[in-house]
Amino acid sequence: MNIRIVNRNKLDVDKYDTCVASSEVPMPYAFSAHMDIVARRWKAVVLGEYEMVMPIAFNRKLLGIPQVYHPFYAQQLGAFGRFQRDVVVIKAMLAALSKFYVRLTMQMNSANPIPNQKGWTFRQRTNYELNLNKPYASIQKTYRKGHKANVKAAQELNTLERGMISTADFAKAIAALPATVGLGQLVELIDLYGPESLWVAKLKDGRIGALGFFPTLGKFVDGAERIVYMVGHSTDAGRKAFSGHFLIDGVIQTYAETNTIFDFEGSELSGVGAFFKGFGPDDVPYLLANR
């Protein structure tokens, strides 16, 4: 196989992005514009004439030795293209990486098979996805009883806004959270995906109950859509008013009866995972790969 590692500045960006878009399961994270924001330095493993690509972020924090790491705000990378599910191709691409990097950590995408590669370890991680191709009433029937009750109660206490909050105000609200990382990258991503990617559930008194950043695959690809719950937060007042339930339910209502996957981006945290599962999604795991 003709496999090579190509520096970002040597990539044929059009061919690269076309390859990602042609995947059976494309992800917004892998497109060059997204990678340019989340990774200061990145390259791509390329098969042939961009039949397959695998973006990798790297640094020299291991005693000056280059290592591959997984960047924030890019849950699933791995291999993309026409052979996305081909274990032989995946193994060959990983083998090419192994020749140049001593330490590698990457989260592959849900379409990539487990390659059982010598010298590598692989662990499946949880991710919930909800197909929105049915009428909203049918989708809501799969909600857990408690979620249905909370959404109903929230409707009397919240209103939904899309694209009405500024990037600065959104970033300010998120920056106050103790676990926030890469705030500058987050601001750039919001600028990339546009103000319509910001959703807010407001309480009747005008205070924020919950807010979220929901980038979409449609930024790069026509047709099948994927909307990702990348960043979200409920305030103390919002939790009492079930604003988080109202926010996600509002997005689901908006995209119901479309060829859209709602991607919850996890979670393996038990409380967050239980909250997501209450909306009736499927667990579609992806691989954490280490060498």
Image (cartoon, rainbow, N blue to C red):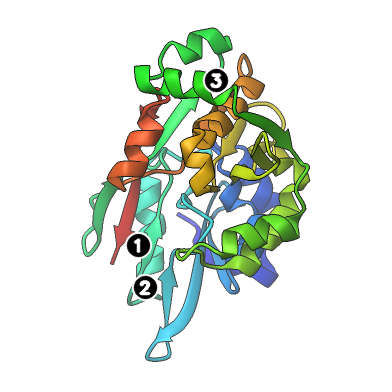
Front residue (pair 20, 242): 242
Which residue is pictured at 69% across the width and 36% down the height? 218
Q: Could you give the CA–CA distance between mark 1 and mark 2, rounded to whole angstroms?
A: 7 Å
Which residue is pictured at 57% across the width and 51% down the height? 29
Q: Quadrant of residue 280?
A: top left
Q: As shown in the figure, which amino acid type bears the numbered disc 2?
A: Lys
Provide the residue designation for mark 3: 132
Which residue is pictured at 64% across the width and 56% down the height? 34
Q: As shown in the figure, which amino acid type bears the numbered disc 3?
A: Leu
Q: Could you give the CA–CA distance between mark 1 and mark 3, rounded to whole angstroms?
A: 38 Å
> Nearer the N terminus, badge 1 or badge 3?
1
Label 1 close to label 2 by CB (< 8 Å): yes
Which residue is pictured at 66% across the width and 23% down the height? 254
Q: Quadrant of residue 243?
A: top right
Label 1 or label 3, whichever lies nearer to me, is 3
51 sits left or right of 142 in the view: right
Mark 3 burial class by Cα count in 10 Å: few <14, some 14-19, many 20+: many
> Residue 152: x percent and y percent?
51, 18
Provide the residue designation for mark 1: 95
Q: Regarding mark 3 in the picture, which secondary structure is present there?
A: loop
Provide the residue designation for mark 2: 99
> Residue 148: x percent and y percent?
44, 18
Q: As shown in the figure, which amino acid type bears the numbered disc 1?
A: Ala
